[in-house]
Each structure stands twice: as structure tokens, then as C-alpha cells.
Image (spheres, rainbow, N blue to C red):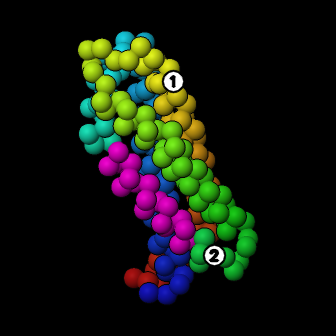
Amino acid sequence: MNRTAIQAISRLAGLLFGGLFAGFLTGVLVLELSLRGFDGAVYTQLQQVALIGLPILASVLLFPALIATAVQVFLGARSRGRTFWLTVGALALLLAALVTTLVVNVPINLAEGGWNIQSPPEDWASVRDRWQLGHLIRTCAALFAFAALAVAVVRQPMQLRSSLHASA
């Protein structure tokens, strides 16, 4: 497989996984905002159920997006054109989403996993608010990363198509 084909495949993989990750985070954001009118017991129960599978889904979507986007940056480093800088920006935004997750959301997830559903801590609402702010930040980062990757793909549609046909 030649360099151009690898670049085309990584561009498509980055766009696909980046878009799925951004969509996943957007869905979680809508759910979280819908929960704001409920009490601590409802919030705690939903968070504990969500922690069963959603972190796995987030990892399955984010890490391929990061890897594919990093490959694009590495392979496009010689060009330094607009597409390259869009991809660098997308990679930085995906990394920002990861860092926000690790610094803000994961520690709160770990704490919430041990909460008593019937009697969450008194400060549960402020903890929820911090988690939701971190989630909003990572969702915006993922959405902007996806937008940058989409613009990068649209900027070079003919090169992408010819690369895929050449590798087939």
C-alpha cells in the first residue's frame, strides 16, 4: 500500500471515528441536560448504569480517531498546506477532549460509581455540574475536531477518490 493510499484511508478513518465520537458525546450531552430536573437518586442511578458500557464505547471511538488523525499529520507534514493545519487542529482538539476526560470526567465517574443511589452526597449537584461542564468542553472540542476533519476531506476530494481507486 502506498503513502497516498494510507493517507486516504487514515483521512476516512479519522473522519468516521471522529464523527462517531462527536455524535456520541452530543447524545450524552442531550441526556445529561435532560436530567437536570431530576433529583440526586435518579441522576446517580443513571450515571452508574451509564458507567457500565459508555466508557468502553468512548474509548473504541476516540482512540482510532486519534491514531488516524495522527497518521494524517505525520504523512502530511511535508505539505504544510491548509489541509495539514486543519488536521493538526483536529488532532489538538481530540487531544484536548482526551485530557478533559482524564482530568475532569474520569475522577468524577470513579467517585459517582461508589455513591449510594438512595442517598447521594449532599454536594451531588455541584459534582454533576462540574462533570457536565467538563463534558460540554470535550463535546465542543470533538465537534470542532470533526468539523476540521470534514473540511480537510472536502478540500481534497479528488485526491482521496483517486487514492482509494489506486489501492483497490
Residue 145 in view, yes or no: no
Q: Is residue 127 above or below residue 105?
A: above
Q: Position of residue 5 (x, y in %)?
A: 49, 80
Picture residue at 56% right of the left edge, 55% below the top: 95
Q: Residues within 10 Å of mark 2 (few under 14, many from 20)?
A: some
The amino acid at mark 2 is: Gly
Q: Residues within 10 Å of mark 1 (few under 14, many from 20)?
A: few
Q: Nearer the viewer, mark 2 or mark 1?
A: 1
Picture residue at 62% right of the left edge, 63% below the top: 87
Quarter of the figure with residue 115: top left
Q: In this view, does 69 lie above or below 23?
A: below
Q: Considering only order in the chain, which callout, 1 or 2, is on the residue closer to the N terminus? A: 2
Q: Position of residue 118 (x, y in %)?
A: 26, 14
Q: Where is residue 33 in the image (x, y as percent from the top left)?
A: 46, 23
The amino acid at mark 1 is: Asp
Quarter of the figure with residue 141: top right
For the stretch drawn in magenta, the main secondary structure is helix
Q: Mark 2 points at which residue?
A: 76
Q: Quadrant of the N terminus?
A: bottom left
- Tell me if 78 is positioned left or right of 107 in this view: right
Q: Give the range drawn in magenta.
A: 55-72
Picture residue at 55% right of the left edge, 68% below the top: 70
Q: Is residue 17 above or below residue 67?
A: above
Of residues 109 and 79, the one nearer the viewer is 109
Residue 24 in view, yes or no: yes
Which secondary structure lies at badge 2? helix
> Do residues under tags 2 and 1 come within 8 Å of each other at their CB atoms?
no
Badge number at residue 129: 1
Picture residue at 36% right of the left edge, 55% below the top: 60
Badge number at residue 10: none
- Tell me if 85 is positioned left or right of 127 in this view: right
Q: Position of residue 27 (x, y in %)?
A: 42, 35
